[in-house]
Image (cartoon, coloured by chain):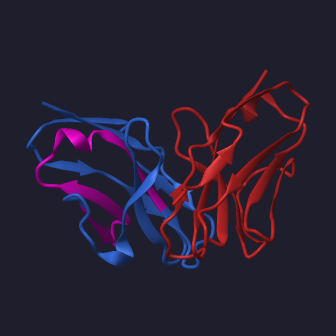
Amino acid sequence: AQRVTQPEKLLSVFKGAPVELKCNYSYSGSPELFWYVQYSRQRLQLLLRHISRESIKGFTADLNKGETSFHLKKPFAQEEDSAMYYCALSGLYGQNFVFGPGTRLSVLP
Amino acid sequence: DAGVTQSPTHLIKTRGQHVTLRCSPISGHKSVSWYQQVLGQGPQFIFQYYEKEERGRGNFPDRFSARQFPNYSSELNVNALLLGDSALYLCASSLVPFNEKLFFGSGTQLSVL
């Protein structure tokens, strides 16, 4: 069965500290992996997707097929990074999107 | 350029009633998907439509149905409402259904009393 787990409900770090949001998945086949973010009073929006291999707002995520993980990382957290982060996967053709439960990141001054 | 619009924003119903939620995608987007988000959880996939055809269905009972119109807007219908259907219902649109960035609406908050 398709599943996305995010073990931390809440993660608090100080400004300037490194941050890593964990995501593990189970999927029979080759999924597409994404990170979505929801800032306070804003809509859910795409942060990055693994096929693009891009860095958005200083965030990167590496797909580790052996560990079935797609952790989100940023070397120096900023206060504006405080938000709800969701890891998600879909089938190769976009079917059956599955979201994780989310991790709330709080960056303290 | 208007984003994904959903109506209504809030809705209160009683058990056993039915509800219709509406979604207008971003202009040019042909794929629409629906999600249910219960407080404290991530969005859960309900349906995906592309070019007016159902492309995917999540693990929801047959009380949930949807359709997509020729102008690519979409409706989500829920019959025989249960208390557990209380949630935020999100609509998302994309150009095509695969490997694509989803653009989300603000959602419809449904309360079933």
Task: Specify the quadrant that holds the C terminus of chain A.
Answer: top left
Magenta stretch bounds: A60-88
Q: Residue at x 47, y 46 (%)?
A: A43
Mark yes or no: residue A65 visible. no
Count of numbered badges drawn on the protein: 0
Which residue is nearer to you in this view: B1 or A80?
Answer: B1
Which of the 4 quarters of the picture holds residue A68? bottom left
Rendered red, the chain in question is B
Give the x, y percent position of residue A95. Answer: 62, 70
Mark yes or no: residue A58 visible. yes
Give the x, y percent position of residue A108. Answer: 17, 31
Q: Residue at x 60, y 36 (%)?
A: B38
Which residue is nearer to you in this view: A65 or B13?
Answer: B13
A61 in magenta: yes
Which of the 4 quarters of the picture holds residue B11? top right
Among all residues in the image, which is located at the extreme top? B113
In-image side of A12 versus A44 (left or right): left
Q: Residue at x 51, y 33 (%)?
A: B40
A1 in magenta: no
Give the x, y percent position of residue B68. Answer: 79, 65
Task: Specify the quadrant that holds the N terminus of chain A.
Answer: bottom right
Examine the rendered structure and indicate whether residue A23 appears above or below residue B30.
Answer: above
Rendered blue, the chain in question is A
Among all residues in the image, which is located at the extreme front? B1
Examine the rendered structure and indicate whether residue B65 appears above or below residue B7.
Answer: below
Examine the rendered structure and indicate whether residue A108 appears above or below residue A73.
Answer: above
